Image (tube, coloured by chain):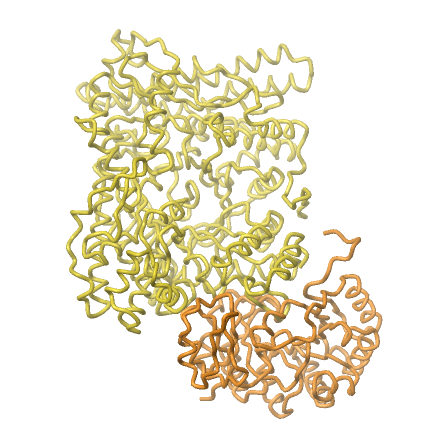
Amino acid sequence: MASVVLLDIQRMSSEDGPGLRTTAFLKGCPLNCPWCHNPESISFKPQVLWHGTRCIGCAGCVKVCPLHGIELKPGGLERSSACIGCFACCEECPAGAHEGKGHETEVKALARQLVKDRAYWGKDGGVTLSGGEALMQEGMVDLLCILKFAGVHTALDTCGFVPAARLERALAYTDLVLYDLKLADPVEHKELTGVSNAVILDNLKTVAAWAVKGGRLWIRTPIIPGATDSAANISGIAAILNALPEGAVERWELCAFNNLCGAKYKSLGLSWAYEGIPLMEKAMLEALVALAEQTDCCPNIRWTGAAQRTADSTS
Amino acid sequence: MPTITKKDKNGVKIPYNLSPRIQWLRDYYFRGTERPWNNAFMPFTTGAEWDELYEEQTFYNAPETYCFYSVMNKTFRQSAYEVLLPKMNPVTGERSDFFSWSLPERKAWFTKEVMVHYLPQEILPGDLIAGGRFNLMASRCWNRKEAKRHDELLHGKDGKSGLHRDAIAFEECGFGNCGATSGHLISNYPKALRIGWKGIKAEIREKYDSLTAAQRKGSKGNQLRAMLTACDMPIELAARYAVLCRKLAVEETNAARKAELEQMAANLDIVPAEAPQNFWQAIQSLWLTHMLIMSDENYPGPGVSFGRLDQYMYPFWQKSIEEGMDREFGKEILKCFWMHCNTAYDAMINSGNQGITAGYGQLFNISGRDAAGNDQTNDFTWVLLETLDEMAPILEPKPNVRLHKNTPDDLLDKVVDMIADSQGAPFLLNFDERSMAGMLREARMAGVEDKIHPENVHEYASVGCLENTMCGNDRSATVDCNLNLYKALELALGGGGELVTYVDGLWNKPYPPEKNAPRTGDPCQFTDFEQLWDAFAVQMKYIVKKMVDLYNRSCACRAAFGPTPYLSCLVEGCADKGLDVTQGGAELSFVTIEGVTFATTVDSLLAVKYLVFDKKLCTMEELIQALKANWLGFEKLQAIAKNKAPKYGRDDDEADALARRVMDLWSEETWRYTTPTGARYRPGMLSWNYWIGQGFILPASPDGRCRGQFLSNAICPVNGADINGPTSNANSVGIALGGFAEDGEGDFEGYLNALPNGASHTMTLSPALLRDDEHREKLKSFLRGYIANGGTALQINVLDADMLRDAQAHPENYKNLLVRVTGYNAYFTSVGKELQDEIIARESHNNY
């Protein structure tokens, strides 16, 4: 049986599709968006997150690192960037200060984990496969198949930059697709995410065709200051949606930029381009939703996530 | 029905839809010590120089009271009003000296005399329900010989031994605490409403008349005569209040109020002597009947609960509505009743904090299923929920909503709305299927299947907080015994000895080391985990037996010296047997041993197994040294124990299997014992505040906890151990209780439940689940999942700004606290101060 590289399982997730869900985050993504909220999900390789506040200073990790890449210095512990993700430090650390991400997991065993909350899913909850990019791993189709045959409601959260054949095979076992559309303009897309959106838009057509034949499709757009938050981009995406078959898109979510993940970049020893950028203002998000609604591209458009309270709003 | 929510500037809910009358009564109540009127204890004595009023045993389960007993005893005695004693027996009419009567007859007469003729009767402006003062500190009514015998039981002939010393030593040496405590039961209120106190008296009279002359002279006759006297108390008291209402009506100038007072008098002419004819009379009857039960044990009876209020009150409500009663006026009556319940707290009003210490737990259940699984929600269920919502925040009475597989969506919507608006549930949720499974197991274990069976088990209700019992015939004694399960592991690790020296709380004098625990061998010689388990099991039997031996003495003392004739009238079985409820008169008599420190014990066993036997990271000797040193100098080992060893509460099959094993071991042990009054011991899990205080007494534990840190609460996982979120936490709890039977039958509809008395489970959820209708649906799915997989009772808290601020100050307690926004999650404690502040600001305004 196939295995996959797992990042995390989030149980009782309320934000990854309808109902309460269990979300499996897979490691590795073909895109490289500078605003990524889960930077540890980008690389396909195993990685170690470093939580300095948990360290008790026992220096056990210094001794076990095969690369001698960890040093205990007066200012605290330093990890070499040459880390190969062998997790020796994670196993050794008594305090969980080194946290290994990206364990190989056998698909059947993963499926057993994912259905443990079945009782809580209610009418429309289930399992969401997310990432990174779930479909970059071949084992995901097997996983979807196992879940579907077990009667589980399956959702696939994808960036769309995936092999078309695999996507088609996956759709056969999928109830809902959460499809990311970040930027309408192919040049900007290439500039910011590292790839053009051509493949993404092609695959979107496949998914839309599947949606009108009984599937469900939600579009998600991260609203990132200075990157995707322009009126032009929202109108551009709306135009893409309007070109899809009537009724293909059930919902479009504008996911507000969130600035909490700076700590994760630090844990990975990385700097983050958006460090210090404040949350978006609620009024601006509402304006983008209003703009999108004018295009008539989708019956249900909403913004999600956290926003700054504007001076005049009280709650 | 839309929920109207108003909040003050700090986000605290404020009451709404209150009439000027109710607003005034509520405001008046909250003026506390500034009120000219209150319901503070009033002490009364027989005048005998040996007289005593205060029963310290009642408080042995409240360690914070230990140092006040002698002061209480003296103060109440010295400030007591003297009552003129009678020369004639009220039932037989014979001339005789008061002290020559039996103790129950003395007690019944004395309480009635004081309640009717000494305690002032008063009615607050606008109040629609009569029955003001009831907090009595009445004489125990002992004669000289009884007082001496009681003193010997408590203090020994030498004044230095006896129950007092042993109960305190038991607690201060970390075993837990126990004592025969008052309250904690549901008396037969539906019967008082069905046939009135005249009807109850007639039944008892018939039983008395059928006694032989010899029996009348014996204890049965004594008890029944006492109960006959007690039956007159509510009737005579109502008559006094009727007179008062008429007097006030004459003086009243406002016509509307005059009419109300006249109607109140007319109500009191009928109830509680007879069956009520409408809703107003039913509530009046219920209140007078209930308040006298609160006072029958010299304590505003803790956990004196109402049972299934929406079920037995519904016919009266329905009748009055059909006869044209305005729905809002019906609620007005109910709101007066609400205010009366809160006056219980006035008992110690002058001792600080307006007398509010712990809750009195006048609990009522609403909704629930019938035997076939049909939902029993009715219009009055909704009335109670509306009243609660409009009056909140207020402490009493306490609602407990029964959920089950067929709970209707609209009720669940209301429950979720109320959780959202109160930043945490203003009620406990009880889960029928798992609870009923426990009750049926109890019936089997105790051999009372004729009294609790699949056809009537749905008539169960909860007492105090969440303790499941039958109604009207069950002496449930749900908080009398509180046992620290971790003590058994301490003794196993000490080979029968203790790991630390325990000291006397007052003088810091060391207690002698434990001598009587079985010698289970040097744990350093154990070669596998099973040997440790065997030693633990032997010590578990020892600590259960030790508690039983101590409690049996306390129980026998109460049976001999603490009759409750009034209460006994409303508990089925007492009249038939001619026995007081404290003597085993009830048809069902139980004493719950509440298991405390469950998760700490399970995680500690898991840690020993992981550290010493599976991973061999240290020797048993090193681990014991570390515990004795309170982990000082063993920080690395402690960190491994905390962070690497498996834990209960994560839906980890292996860890939960051990939890189940511990549960089976200790719970089965409790069933082996019976009190001298014939009450069966049974298991439950409710830790009140012990998990905090006992953490300073019990030594460090192998799960990495230091002495001085909190223990685990009831059936909850150790704080912060549930890193996989609420669903895995709930799954673990369900599995620890027994999970599901493989044969599909189990104790009830496939469910298994080792804890018939219930298991307290508290969970904190993110406010994100409450932010809009779509998310409230998600919370509903969670609750439906809990009905299927979880435990017996759940308190939901909502993560709030205060908690986040505490997490900021004490990150070590919250290292697994996840904050989640769309598509992103992070540990709160790892995000840095500035962002923490931002999250707090956001949470404070619920602006997710």
Question: From the viewer's perspective, is residue B516 above or below residue B231?
Answer: below
In the rendered image, the quadrant that contains the C terminus of chain B is: bottom right
The one nearer the camera, B770 or B638, is B638
Across and down, in percent, residue B203 comes to 34, 26
Question: From the viewer's perspective, is residue A312 above or below residue B556?
Answer: below
> Quarter of the image holding residue A225?
bottom right
The one nearer the camera, B790 or B587, is B790
Residue A107 shows up from this direction: no
Chain A shown in which color? orange
At 60% across and 53% down in the image, what residue appears? B413
Left or right of B737, for residue B445: left
Across and down, in percent, residue B355 comes to 48, 30
Left or right of B484, for residue A208: right
Chain B shown in which color? yellow
Going by the picture, which residue comes out furthest to the front? A74
Across and down, in percent, residue B77 comes to 35, 18
